[in-house]
Image: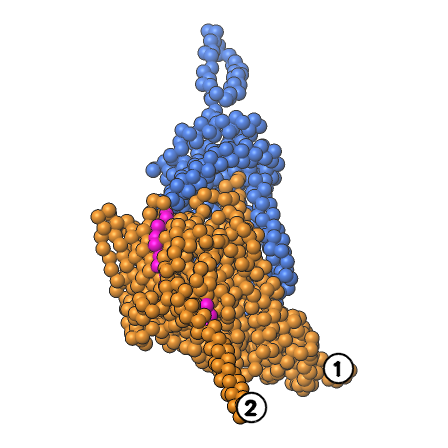
Chain colours: A blue, B orange
Amino acid sequence: MSENKGLLSSGWSMVARNKRYIFWFYVLNVALARFGATAFSNQVHEILDHSLHANRLVQGFDVSVLVEMFMRPEFGPTSASVGSAAGFALLFLFATALFLPGVLQGYASTYRLPREDFFRACGRNLWRFVRLLIVAFIVFLIVGIPLFGLHGVLERKAAESTNELLLPEVQFAGLAVIFLVMAALRIWFDLAQADVVLSDQRAVRKSIGTAFRHTWKNLGRLLASYVVITIFAAAVLVAGLFVWMKFVPAASVVGAIVVGQLTLLLLLIPRFWQRGVVVTYYLQHMVAPIAVQSFTPAPVVLPVVSEPVAVPIVPSAPPEPQAS
Amino acid sequence: MKIRWMILFFPAVSVIALSLLVQHHAARAAAPQGALAAASVANAASVAPGPLTIPDTTLAINSDKPMSQRVVHYEIDAKYDAAQHAVNATEVLTYRNLTGQALDHFPFHLYQNAFQPNSTFVREAKVAGNRDTGYDKWEAKEYGSEDIKSLEAVGQGDLTSQIQYIQPDDGNKDDKTVVDVHLPKPVAPGDYVQFKIAFQTKFPETQARSGWKRDFVLGGQWFPKVGVWWHGAWNCHQYHAMTEFFADFGVYDVKLTVPQYEVVGASGIKVGEVSNPDSTKTVTYHGDDIHDFAWTASPRYKVKEDGVFQGQMGPVHMRILMQPAHWSQAERHEKILRESLEHFENWYGPYPYKTITLVDPEPDSAAGGMEYPTFITGDSSWFMPDGLYLPEVVVEHEFGHQYWYGMVATNEFEDAWMDEGINSYTEVKVLDSILGKNTSIMNLAGATVGERELQRLGYIRVADLDPIAEKAYDYYSYGSYGGITYGKTACVLLTLESIVGEDTMAKAMRTYFMKYRFTHPTKEDFLKTIEEVSGKDLRWYFNQAIYGSQVMDYEVRKIESFPVNWYVEKKDAGKKGDKDTVYRSSVWLQRKGDFVMPVDVEVKFENGEKVREIWDGASRWTKFTYERKSKVESAEIDPDHKIVIDRNDFNNSYTDEANGKPARKLENYWQFMTQWIGQALAWWAV
């Protein structure tokens, strides 16, 4: 537990020291979503702006008005808005992949990483991250398909039971197990990402292998950290929605925007915290130790002379440190 | 002398002969009726005299005399085989011929035969859709059957070999949902006939609110049921994917033998229960003035039966069979049942039965939300937050059917809107009253949905597909059947309130119920009642709304204001605080649909003044023009929101200035979701 504390607190310190990354990722998140929502925005303004019927959405939230709006031919196909939003959500994913190496580099630095170093790390690791993403995707599929398949089988079996509560219990337990397995996979590839960036490892497969060994060896400790942080994220989401529903008046659009965006900003923190945990772990356990050969200068035998003579001593340079 | 005698003799003989001849002809002329009548009486099956009769019992109703004209008496002795999901039974049906003519054949419904791959029900469901399954792939457990093992008309012998399947609606020879029995001897008017039938019913896994699921069973439409003589002919339709049922009133005495461990519920009242030596028990039910009988059994029901509603005719015992995981919702179920009883009694008329059984059916079964006389099924789940009123909506709806189908027994095959639609209308009224106008479906976390709007949404999806007055099996699709029979009818009747007045409409509904309870009224009976009570000729409305498929869509097309002296340059014109400029303002309205109806229009000016107009809607568009020291701020058609059949509520009003707040609110939700999904994707993928 104390080790976990170490990981969690050190990871948190990294996040706290580098708040700017969260800010910029948030800006990216907002900006891309804004573009993603443009199609929807145009459609709803067209229908609602001059209609008194739309007021039922302001003084409360009449879901039937929303459904009727979706049904209007002038709203157009829902797929247009959904497709656009989904596209920009995917763009955020790719942007995260692009800028993540810089974040990891920044977390590992004991000083404020200059902007050019940040982007250099991003550029240098771009192709490596693409390869990591592909491998991770394949691994997630290989593990996920049988897991979800098994979950489905268990669900069907539970659905046959005369105990109605068995089904939700199996569903919950199954999803919890799937979450833990997926979280373990996530830890594996998070460590691999840290190794690729911080060891400047070109051979991605080596990082994946190393990360796997470390994940396997320290699974309990790492997984506990990830679970704690995920619970924190869930708490943030629930608290944000609670405040939104409980304290923001239905007619207050500004209030809803503020609470909603604050929640989303806070929701970015947990994932960065997990990155901090991973970098901490990397620095503690995975960074290649520098083998320093002890250097004992050879004894200098001086001729016995009557008069002391000044002899220039040229110490030989210490050998280059080698990775063990 | 001879001649004199001859003169006297011939006329006398002629008179005598003629009189004899006349008498003979008169006798012959009279003979056929009497002789045929006598023959008919002699030949009729189980001729009346003697024991055959329909009981005039009142055990199950709060009345000392029968409330319906009883046509049938079913005595069924059924044994349920829980392992095979099958019923082996004998049925004694006594039928009283009130048709006014001799009947020489009797059609029977065998509804469970609908659940076979080539039946009309399944064929239609595959094409037009269905409530429970689209039959993409046939599975053995979906099979159901209802086989008559033997049929005897008492006094006419065994007619088993005479029965034949008929397909009066579509000629599908593979459909076995109607069987016809020809009698060697017709049943005279006023006489009785008694059939003794042995049959076996195998239930499918629940479909169309009948069948088994796990160890639960709902026995609905499970016995051979005779058709209804209606408007001079037998009315006995095949079972279709979108139809329900139609039957005559009478008395039911049903013995159900089930495994000892089963908890049983059924139509009518329980009159006996005995344990049998073979680990079974026989439960006996009796029903008066009902036209169907359904039952259920499950070993796991938890029963709440302490609730009694003091009705206008006497106490009504509420028996509620709950799933164990829903036991905490038993109070909710009883509360809405009690409130529904109260509202229906106060608004429409008394509930005469001594019991109402509410069944919370097996989860994930297709047995939820069904009505049978004095027996209804609800629909719930283990997770049901307080602000989500789905159980309440289902219970209220199914209870409403005790009136609109149970007592006012319309033809559900041909006039589905008269039970489902009228019931949906009263459902809106009752739930609005109990749970609030805009919150009767959901009032959760700031989000609301009202029953009225839900019915309207159902309608506007399919507004131009079918008229209301359509046979249930002739609708374009299952979606259209649902949207029109339930949704459109509710909207049409709610809109009718704006024409005749809410109080008049309430009075008309009560009049209709009291006049036609325990009968089979037609659509015209209903429509004429409204006209009579309101004193208005409403044909112009009914022709469009009930018989036609016209769609209503009125629009405020545009509003425009400009200074009358627009050519005179004035500094402050159009600015706030300018009270001197006179504006000419126009409001254009358009009737975009083909439904014509007068509408109210409210025009609001920037200075707060409001003007009400009435537009008859006869032309395609109209314009109202005003000269005021203020510009038009907004115009709204139907400002009191009484018209529920308008397909598009958004274009019923127009504001001169855009108000972006509603759109921004939705934008915010959308943006939040987009951002959150982006974050979640990135969390797991990178």
Q: Secondary structure at mark 2?
A: helix
Residue in the foreground of this view, choosing between B119 and A174: B119
User: Residue at left 45%, top 43%?
Assistant: B140
Q: Where in the figure is residue B133, as x and y percent of width and height?
A: 49, 50
**Tag 1: residue type?**
Trp
The region drawn magenta spans: B85-102
Seen from the viewer's position, the closer of residues B559 and B644 is B644
Q: Nearer the viewer, mark 1 or mark 2?
A: 2
Question: Mark 2 packing: few (<14 Cα in 10 Å), some, or many (20+)?
Answer: few
Q: Secondary structure at mark 1?
A: loop
Q: Residue furthest right?
A: B567
The chain containing the residue under callout 2 comes to: B
Residue under the image location 39 percent in, 50 percent down: B149
Q: Mark 2 = which residue?
A: B3
- Magenta stretch: helix, strand or loop mostly: strand
Q: Are marks 1 and 2 in contact (CB under 8 Å)?
A: no
| Residue under pointer 1 | B566
| Image quadrant where residue B162 sits | bottom left
Asked if the stretch drawn in magenta spans residue B489, the answer is no
| Residue B126: numbered disc | none
Whole-Å distance between the Cαs marked 1 and 2? 125 Å
